[in-house]
Image: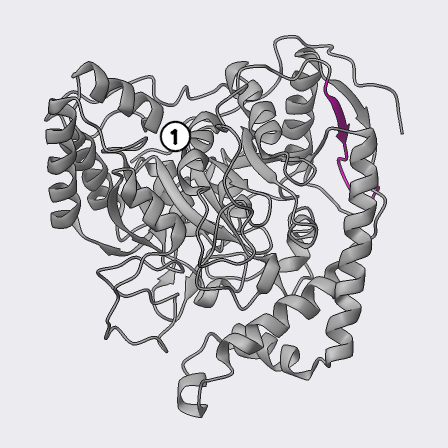
Amino acid sequence: MTDRIAPTDTEGNAAAPSAPGAQIPAPGTGTSPAPVTATALLAAYRAGTLSPVDATRDALARIEATEPAVNAFVRVDAEAALAQAEESARRWERGEPAGLLDGVPVTVKDILLQRGGPTFKGSRTVRAAGPWEEDAPSVARLREHGAVFLGKTTTPEFGWKGVTDSPLSGATRNPYDPALTSGGSSGGGAAAVALGAGPLALGTDGGGSVRIPAAFCGVFALKPTYGRVPLYPASAFGTLAHIGPMTLDARDAALMMDVISGADARDWSQLGPVAESFRTGLDEGVRGLRVAYSPTFGGQVAVDPAVAAAVRAGVERLAALGAWVSEDDPDFTDPVDAFHTLWFSGAARVVQPLGPEARALLDPGLREVCGQGARYSALDYLAAVDTRMELGRRMGRFHERYDLLVTPTLPITAFEAGLEAPKGSGHRRWTGWTPFTYPFNLTQQPAASVPVGTDARGLPVGLQIVGPRHADALVLRAAHALYAAGAAGIAPPAL
């Protein structure tokens, strides 16, 4: 452990924030200059200066302007979205909003069930024939709170990797440079938020899948504590799989967590009702918090210098805000072998029912890892579980000394679309370039990605904040402190 990082630059060195939500589109004027947060939209609805219909039209216009170049959507249902927005507008006119998100446009990753249409999961092996009559728990909660569903966003096949391309829908591209990947596996949702195609996106995260695309696309994402957001049907990837929000800032994520965290009896592993709002205490800042800053996991990870500089600037801002920051590393070596055993076994289970003809339709990389997963024995699996338990113990002890851990979200910025790993990196699998994300799926801890700057090419850089299990509100509070201080958020991509 080294000395506390001194707040040598009280102005901070992160890129200038984009101030999401600063500009609200006037009715009928089309797209606004910058994406607008859900919080700002709701304030405008309440004041009567904006209608949910206008916000939905704006989101649909952004989709039309950027699809298919970005390819963030599997399906868009403009007619249904506008009908939902009109119903919401009537409720607001009566002063009777249905819930916390009434009239806010949202998107749903095409891994999660949404009644009324197919959930393809990025695969040509899934047939469109229904019936599709059930919402996943998080989708049901969004519906109950009046959200407007714009469409389903892209995913790699069954969400198996950290980039978003599939045999079904092709590659999803980065809003800052369409030649590059959006990241994954919730890449469509992150790209949609960055482009203003709905301020809220619902994603899944089994090894970094909301945090990876959030870092590449310059938006915020939270992987909550496992079980905090109910999941049904159960994931074949087991208790690695989390549900989380991708948003324009931490305040919107806290609002969305208040909605999607309700208990659901279909998930036997869910944590039950939440004691208080995730927005409670959000503005309390970070003064006095004990923060560990691990820039390279003790030299285990080679980090791009531009990424390292932007993340360090964010850490220095936390120190300037009163956090006690020490450079220190968690006491573990890379658990990638254990993660592969659990992850590839889950992938093999996903495709187990498929016959030879259906398997021929799969992503070749997925076929390869499924073959590897099918060769693991029960003892191999249990050995990986042992590694996972030990990792959880070590992180539990680490958080006796520190309230939060900060790392880069990723060691690199976005690379060429359509590849699982960057050319020349030496990595075959996506886990080679995501060493900061998947360990915290193994431990089930809450972890957020916060945009804190860009590299020389203008590509976003993410800072990861990790908390002990059940400390989701604390992670959100620290992230919000960076936004409030102007150290988070980057200029939106040009439409």
Residue appearing at x 18%, y 26% in the figure: 96
Instruction: Count residues near mark 1 (Cα–Cα under 10 Å), then give few for <14, some for 14-19, many for 20+.
Output: many
Residue appearing at x 45%, y 58% in the figure: 164
Q: Which residue is mark 1?
A: 492
Give the prevailing secondary structure in the magenta stretch: loop
Q: Position of residue 288 (x, y in %)?
A: 73, 14
Q: Dot 1 lies on which element?
A: loop
Q: Quadrant of residue 487?
A: top right
Left or right: 400 as drawn, with respect to 55: right
Q: Nearer the viewer, residue 244 or 77?
A: 244
Colour mode of the rendering: one colour
Residue appearing at x 58%, y 71% in the figure: 346
Magenta-colored span: 289-300
State whether residue 396 is above or below residue 231: above
Q: Quadrant of the C terminus?
A: top left
Q: Position of residue 253 (x, y in %)?
A: 45, 33
Left or right: 125 as drawn, with respect to 325: left
Q: Nearer the viewer, residue 140 or 62?
A: 140
Q: Amino acid at mark 1?
A: Pro
